[in-house]
């Protein structure tokens, strides 16, 4: 499968969707976007990278 882009992970529904996607798909195939840097950092704790990581 290709890459999956999920926007709005800084909201309640988006965060839940991100958590579920992390259980279904390898993190290398997931791209999460949102406005809140703090919310994105919370998702990074689940094992994903943030934008400051080198690809």
Image: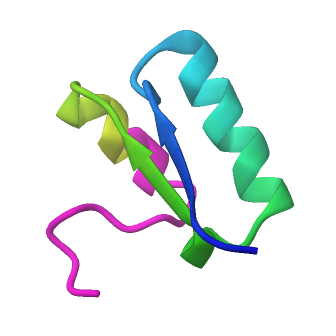
Q: Residue at x 68, y 41 (%)?
A: 19
- In this rendering, is residue 54 above or below 32? below
List x then y, in percent, for residue 12: 55, 12
Q: Is residue 37 above or below residue 54?
A: above
Task: Specify the quadrant that holds the N terminus.
Answer: bottom right
Our reading of the magenta stretch's main secondary structure is loop
Residue 44 among magenta residues: yes
Extreme left residue here? 52
Q: Residue 42's spot in the image, x, y percent?
A: 41, 40
Instruction: Give the image location of residue 51, x and y in percent.
Output: 21, 63
Residue drawn at x 77%, y 65% is: 25
Count of numbered circles in the view: 0
Residue 7 position by quadrant: top left
In the image: residue 50, left or right of residue 12: left
The furthest residue to the right: 24
For the C terminus, give its image quadrant: bottom left
Vertical arrangement, residue 2 with respect to residue 45, above or below: below
Q: Pick the residue in front: 41 or 2.
A: 2
Residue sitting at 34 percent across and 30 percent down?
39
Q: Is residue 39 left or right of residue 25?
A: left
* Rendering quarter of residue 26: bottom right
Query: Per the image, is 6 magenta?
Result: no
Q: Which residues are magenta?
A: 42-55
Q: Residue 16 lies in what quarter of the image?
A: top right
């Amino acid at each position: 499968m290709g890459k999956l882009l999920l926007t709005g992970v800084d909201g309640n529904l988006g965060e839940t969707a991100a958590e579920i996607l992390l259980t279904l798909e390898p993190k290398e195939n997931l791209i999460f976007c949102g406005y809140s840097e703090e919310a994105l950092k919370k998702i990074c704790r689940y094992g994903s990278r943030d934008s400051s990581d080198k690809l």
